[in-house]
Image (tube, grey):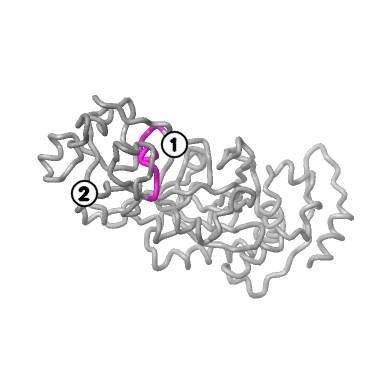
């Protein structure tokens, strides 16, 4: 049997929360995994109707798009100024006038009262999709590299696939574009596999595509309902038709560890592992634990899984081993 090893490796924020997402590295079969809890934030990048053409009459509105145009820039509070702007286009494909002429693509240089009102600080203008109603919206990971960067078909559609955005707290732990994971809604056990197809620059976790978001929260009520993630760094597996099978295999092998119950408890509690070791018994038999375990058993095909007793061995502390084993027996 394999014994899983747990290490606290970081803290991040999520939607509406400063801090509070504790990242734990789990070493065991098939390499490492990262687990954490957070509140979700929606990412619409890559959807064909993500960013509508700038409308001078409503510069802060969506204007028929799924997202505000300012969210396609490097400044979430961006404004649009005649004569150009101090931010850069991020998430909206852009070109200078010379680049657009060389590549034969249409860019938005005809805005009134100034053609430069949608020009960024690198002198780039947003690239149009056919019809000139929407700009080309990109994801950091390409779906189909046969299409050029200025073609919407190159990118993953946030409304059609379950993806996440990899951010600095995860990158520091080896998570990159193409890596995959599994997300579980704590309050009811709804779950969904996903992969990382976009990127963000903030010290946050939990930014996910509209498709993944609505799979977990069809009522858009995510603010008070944490989601538990288990992510597998350095997998970089882009074959969509076999990705779910790969995730199932990794979850199955984790289930073979002699202290897999410890992982389930830590995932359900959503604290640092150090805090978990001091309060672990409090997480036993909670609804969140039942939901996390139920999702792992179902998707990971843990047909013959049984909870196993384990001991918490903490340096400089004296855990109540007898009480812990009794709790473990009750649930096994």
For the C terminus, the quadrant is: bottom right
Quadrant containing the N terminus in the rendered view: bottom right
Asked if 13 appears above or below 162 in the picture, the reply is: above
Relative to 152, say whether 201 is above or below.
Answer: above
Which residue does the image show at 36% across and 30% down from the upper left?
A: 79
Label 1: how many Cα within 10 Å (few below 14, some 14–19, many 20+): few
Q: Circles 2 and 1: CB distance less than 8 Å?
A: no
Direction front: furthest residue: 57
Magenta part, dominant SS: loop
Query: Residue 227: horizontal and vertical position, in percent?
Result: 60, 53
Horizontal side of 312 relative to 105 (left or right) equals right
Residue 261: x, y in percent? 71, 59
Residue 100 horizontal side relative to residue 120, left or right: left
Numbered mark located on residue 62 in the image: none
Q: Which residue is drawn at 85% across and 46% down?
A: 319
CA gap, disc 2 to disc 1? 29 Å
Determine whether the residue tagged by mark 1 lies in a helix, strand or loop: loop
Q: Residues within 10 Å of mark 2 (few under 14, many from 20)?
A: some
Q: Reply yes or no: does residue 72 show up in magenta.
A: yes
Residue 119's quadrant in the figure?
A: top left
Where does residue 137 sit, x and y in percent of width and height?
Answer: 31, 47
Q: Give the range drawn in magenta.
A: 66-75
Closest to the observer, 287 or 236: 287
- Please determine whether, in this image, residue 116 is positioned above or below residue 298: above
The residue drawn where x is 15% and y is 45% is 105
Q: Name the residue under label 2.
A: 132
Location of mark 1 (residue): 201
- Can residue 103 be found in the magenta stretch? no
């Amino acid at each position: 049997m394999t014994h899983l090893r747990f290490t606290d490796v970081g803290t991040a924020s999520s939607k509406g929360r400063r801090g509070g997402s504790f990242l734990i590295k789990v070493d065991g079969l098939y390499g490492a995994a990262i687990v954490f809890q957070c509140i979700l934030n929606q990412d619409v990048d890559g959807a064909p109707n993500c960013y509508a053409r700038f409308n001078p009459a409503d510069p802060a509105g969506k204007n028929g798009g799924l997202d505000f145009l300012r969210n396609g820039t490097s400044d979430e509070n961006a404004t649009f100024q005649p004569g150009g702007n101090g931010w850069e286009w991020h998430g909206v494909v852009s070109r200078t006038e010379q680049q657009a002429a060389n590549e034969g693509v249409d860019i938005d240089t005809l805005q009134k009262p100034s053609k430069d009102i949608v020009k960024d600080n690198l002198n780039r203008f947003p690239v149009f999709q056919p019809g000139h109603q929407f700009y080309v919206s990109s994801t950091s990971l390409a779906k189909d590299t046969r299409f050029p960067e200025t073609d919407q078909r190159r990118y993953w559609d946030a409304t059609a696939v379950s993806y996440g955005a990899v951010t600095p707290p995860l990158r520091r732990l080896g998570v990159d574009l193409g890596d995959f994971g599994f997300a579980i809604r704590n309050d009811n056990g709804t779950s969904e596999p996903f992969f990382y197809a976009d990127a963000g620059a903030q010290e946050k976790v939990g930014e996910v595509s509209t498709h993944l978001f609505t799979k977990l929260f069809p009522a858009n009520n995510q603010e008070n309902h944490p989601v538990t993630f288990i992510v597998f760094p350095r997998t970089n597996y882009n074959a969509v038709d076999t990705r779910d099978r790969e995730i199932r295999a990794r979850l199955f092998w984790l289930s073979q560890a002699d202290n897999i119950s410890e992982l389930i408890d830590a995932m359900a509690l959503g604290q640092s592992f150090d805090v978990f070791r001091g309060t672990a018994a409090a997480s036993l038999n909670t609804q969140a634990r039942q939901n996390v375990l139920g999702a792992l058993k179902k998707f990971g095909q843990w047909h013959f899984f049984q909870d196993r007793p384990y001991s918490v061995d903490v340096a400089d502390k004296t855990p109540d081993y007898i009480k812990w084993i009794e709790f473990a027996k009750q649930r096994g």
